[in-house]
Image (tube, rainbow, N blue to C red):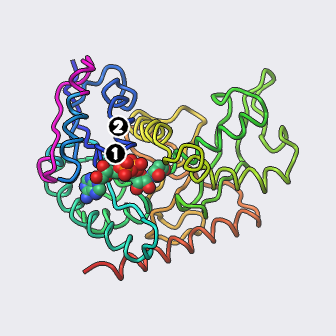
Amino acid sequence: AKEPARVLVTGAAGQIGYALVPMIARGVMLGADQPVILHLLDIPFAAEALNGVKMELIDAAFPLLKGVVATTDVVEACTGVNIAVMVGGFPRKEGMERKDVMSKNVSIYKSQASALEKYAAANCKVLVVANPANTNALILKEFAPSIPEKNISCLTRLDHNRALGQVSERLNVQVSDVKNVIIWGNHSSSQYPDVNHATVKTPSGEKPVRGLVADDAWLNGEFIATVQQRGAAIIKARKLSSALSAASSACDHIRDWVLGTPEGTWVSMGVYSDGSYNVPAGLIYSFPVTCCNGDWKIVQGLPIDEFSRKKLDATADELSEEKALAYTCIN
Ligand code: NAX
């Protein structure tokens, strides 16, 4: 039998945490043959709720779940973890300045970076979900210099999956037959959902989404806006932000990273830019990636048209600004 993997979930008493931890305990993230020990971290204010989550995990009697560490101590939470899913953060409240929110998150991600660096297992893979996700991941990277930059990522898979969903609804095809959309850039409304290389599996082979939809106005307009604004639409409908879809996408992100993407398929991940596609190096930016043997690689050589170029640059500019703002918050 395999040794259990230790999976940290921060913000585990929150909405996404509540949807995510049972998925991990059922093997959705790491596979049906991979036992897990869950490390749950939250702040003292949420300690009682966190303990309730632990009680429910015990009550669910998940066969793969070999232990639960529920704690408000960041060192205990980080010790020995193989996977870290960072969902905890400081939300923007009405009337708050962007800089104040950034400052709170910089201080959270700075201290959690140090704890992961010192106490996590060697080769721990980190996924940042909490917003501003790209910049929180960048701060984490900066303050955990001994964690390889290849091991630090942020979640744009939810946006990627939303794009697959919109194409499948529009064409009335199975979502599992749609692939190779791309989310470029920031997990914010400046992101660029790109269908230029996306395909649909049909009885007569793989066909480009552009040809099948044959409505460029929709693809260049409403489709992009719908994906960009989907988070806001969920809040409007549910009076709460996306949780089950965020949790499920976080599992997809880690599963593909660890177990690999299928041949001929790429996914979107926020990763440390090396300057590919003329995106400034040193940002955490969402790119199309393939994964193999636990490593991601940016898909190279895709042609970028003028329309796309502007959108790739605009979201990069926003990330450069966020980065600059974050740096003014480091004390
Ligand atoms: P909740 O407010 O329900 O939960 C957040 C939890 O984090 C709370 O229990 C809180 O006590 C805890 N927390 C706060 N500071 C902490 C710290 N220093 N250490 C540990 N825990 C801490 O929010 P939820 O709806 O679960 O969303 C969590 C985060 O995900 C938010 O930042 C949200 O903006 C972000 N999202 C990111 C998405 C993505 O695709 N990247 C999509 C969904 C979501 O909006």
- Residue behind mark 1: 14
Residue at x 17%, y 40% (from the top left corner):
70
Circle 2 residue: 18
Mark 2 CB lies closer than 8 A to ligand 1: yes
**Left or right: 210, with 60 as reference point:** right
Residue 71 quadrant:
top left
The residue furthest right is 214
> What is the span of residues highlighted in magenta in the rendered image?
56-76
Left or right: where 270 falls relative to 44: right
Disc 1 residue type (three-letter)? Gly
Q: Secondary structure at mark 2?
A: helix
Amino acid at pointer 2: Tyr
Residue 228 placement: quadrant: bottom right
Residue 322 on image: x %, y %: 46, 73
Q: Around disc 1, counting alpha carbons within 10 Å, would you say few (fewer than 14), some (14 to 19), or many (20 or more)?
A: some
Q: Is residue 61 magenta?
A: yes
Task: From the top left corner, tell me how far across and down residue 118 is, in percent.
Answer: 14, 57
Give the quarter of the figure containing the N terminus: top left
Q: How many marks?
A: 2
Q: Position of residue 129 (x, y in %)?
A: 40, 51
Residue 284 placed where, x, y %? 45, 63
